[in-house]
Image (cartoon, rainbow, N blue to C red):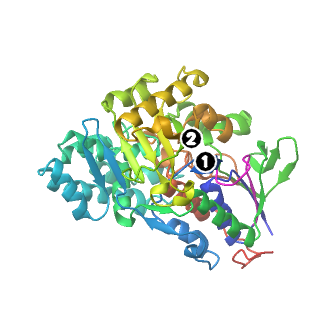
Amino acid sequence: MPSALVVGAGFGGIASALRLRAKGYRVTLLDRCSRLGGRAQVFERGGFRHDAGPTVITAPFLFDELFSLFGEDRRDEVEFVPLSPWYRFHFSNGGIFDYGGSVEDTESEIARFSPGDVQGYRSLLEASRRRFDIGFTQLADHPFHSLNDMVRQIPHLAKLRADRSVYDLVSRHIKHDDLRQAFSIQPLLVGGNPFDTSNIYSLIHYLERKWGVFFAMGGTGAIVDALERLMVKVGIQIELNCTVERLCIHDRIVTGAVVKGRKRIDADLVVSNVDPNYLFRSMIQKKDQPFSLRLKRKLTRLSMGLFVLFFGSTRKYPDVAHHTIWLGPRYKELLEDIFQKKTLAEDFSLYIHRPTATDPSFAPAGMDSFYVLAPVPNLTADIDWQIEAPRLMSRILTALEKNLLPGIRQHVMDPFWMTPDDFSHDYLSEAGAGFSGSPVLSQSAWFRFHNRAEGIRNLYLTGAGTHPGAGLPGVLSSAKVVDRLIPRCRDSSARGEAV
């Protein structure tokens, strides 16, 4: 039975391992963390549970597919609960906008702000659908290895004016400034600046509308646990707490990997769920890389970094929605500070996750669990996070106490944080970027790192830095691309039953 080695156990790596097992390969999955999930780690502090990574579940069928490969039903393992609202926006002027539910619900909310924008929202939704039909339905799970593949899409991209930004598209349909912010933040969910991310990424709006926004009871970690049980059941070998130092390549053919302080593992093929920028800088020798790969890494524009604050509260805040986005007084100017100027501003905008709004098990009775995320510059900026992290935590708690969580400083429990330093160290993320390469047009589709490595045989790439991009739908779709590229084992008709 041919062997496959998957390096990195984020969702892209887990999904690739399962798809390869279903094709009859003997699969080994490696990760340097103490548990599976990649950035979807789980922290337990003082009786509070915190999801460390993705918290928003969209396109749930992509998870369902992984279980159905083996005749299993995801619903038997983990429950997805629809949320309402999907997001609650708090604007700096005190306005509140609930987004989610039916189209009519959203239009009713829009009418409170700007009745004239209701029709504009309908046309924006249609514009998003057209981009979804191209960017997700047709392209998200298809390989982009030939320049001709990209050339064939140029007429579609030109018709959609994909050279224009998400914010530009939203502004052509929506006139109210607050609503423009609310409907243009989607690129930030995948690491991009709404003012220079191609409007093809506005497809995220229709993706949410098509399938809804969900929360996994038990958190994203519960999905990881369910997938781990499935992998064990079907015979995938899992090895944790092991860091791959380098890939073994002979005559431009990958033959395995060397694990730090342990051993070499041979394999007939390797799937990398490592940040491609780190992979080609640190795990593959320069002599084994074609010029196109070296150039792509050199020219890559990285996403922003993330500062994530975790804490519990000894009281509940029932008026705070499950997903809350608190927008500060500056929008474009703050994004320029983060993406262009690479400075840590005094102000910020925040994403607040309160899972106890849906699942009380995240905290002791009568208490709340919080995860607060602030976009910040990545490690290419001159920021000493040893000094700035506690300062930023204090500023964030002050802002939350004033605007959203009254009295939180008296009730906060066990606060801790992650900075771009942690993303770099824990996940080997290049420059501590939160989402690998930024989703600009020049780093999309054929221009992104290919799912079949250029110039190196039997090496495949999955995850946020590859086509189609970051976010759970993106990384799960990247595993589907890899699935399309790797043939089923000739000597096995098995569907990955346990061996």
Q: Is residue 32 magenta?
A: yes
Tell me residue 227's x, y (percent): 65, 65
Q: Is residue 66 above or below residue 5?
A: below
Write the residue at 59% across / 59% down. Answer: 479
Three-letter code, disc 2:
Met
Viewer-closest of 394 and 307:
394
Question: With 62 as the anchor, is 209 left or right in this view?
Answer: left
Q: Which residues are magenta?
A: 26-39
For discs 1 and 2, the disc positioned in front in the rendered view? 2
Which numbered marker is on residue 39?
1
**Magenta portion: prevailing SS class:** loop
Three-letter code, disc 1:
Arg
Q: SS of the residue at dot 1?
A: loop
Viewer-closest of 77 and 270:
77
Viewer-closest of 11 and 405:
405
Q: Residue furthest left?
A: 116
List the residue tagged with mark 2.
Answer: 413
Q: Is residue 230 magenta?
A: no
